[in-house]
Structure formats: structure tokens, C-alpha cells
């Protein structure tokens, strides 16, 4: 006789259906959590890169001003 974890579900009936429904619910919830974590990760990455772009644009402007000052002084 098979006493494995899936033997009740394999036997069918109400217990098997209930176990299947609980497993499906568990995996749906896990998938939902994983997608939420992935979404947050991407949002954090976008925020980080946006700030980096802003920082670099400010540096570019500073360098342009220095070049302009050098041109005006000579």
C-alpha cells in the first residue's frame, strides 16, 4: 500500500479535491508574492537609475559651465 504524501489525493474523493484546491491556492499565493517582489525590484531599479541619470546630467551641466567660463576668459 502506498503511504506517500500524494496517496490521499490520488485516491480521489472529497479529501483529494480539497488537497488539490489547497495546493493550487498555495501556489497562486506564492506566485503572487514572487510577482510583487519582482515588480518592487524593478521599480527600485528604475528609481535608482533615474537618480543616477539626474546626477550625471548635473555633472554635465557643471562641465558645460566650466567650458563656457574658459571660453569667456580667453
Image (cartoon, rainbow, N blue to C red):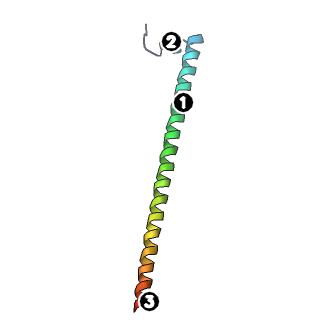
> What SS does tag 1 mark?
helix
**Which label lies toward us, 3 or 2?**
3
Residue linked to disc 3:
72
Residue linked to disc 2:
8
**Which label lies toward us, 3 or 1?**
3
> What SS does tag 2 mark?
helix
Which label's residue is closer to the chain start, 3 or 1? 1
Task: Residue 38 in the image: state x and y as whole percent.
Answer: 49, 43
Using the image as rendered, state which of residue 73 and residue 19 is in the foreground: 73
Residue linked to disc 1:
29
For the point 42% across and 84% down, the residue is 69
**Extreme-bottom residue of the structure:** 74
For the point 52% across and 29% down, the residue is 27
Task: Residue 74 in the image: state x and y as whole percent.
Answer: 39, 92
For the point 42% across and 10% down, the residue is 3
Circle 2 crowding by C-alpha within 10 Å: few under 14, some 14–19, many from 20: some
Check contact, mark 1 vs mark 2: CB within 8 A.
Answer: no
**Which label lies toward us, 1 or 2?**
1
Which label's residue is closer to the chain start, 1 or 2? 2
> What SS does tag 3 mark?
helix
Res 42 label: none
Task: Residue 9 in the image: state x and y as whole percent.
Answer: 52, 15
Amino acid at each position: 500500500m502506498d503511504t506517500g504524501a500524494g496517496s490521499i489525493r490520488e485516491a480521489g474523493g472529497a479529501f483529494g479535491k480539497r488537497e488539490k484546491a489547497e495546493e493550487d491556492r498555495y501556489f497562486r499565493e506564492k506566485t503572487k508574492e514572487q510577482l510583487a517582489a519582482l515588480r518592487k525590484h524593478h521599480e527600485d531599479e528604475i528609481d535608482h537609475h533615474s537618480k543616477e541619470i539626474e546626477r550625471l546630467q548635473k555633472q554635465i551641466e557643471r562641465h558645460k559651465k566650466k567650458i563656457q567660463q574658459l571660453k569667456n576668459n580667453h
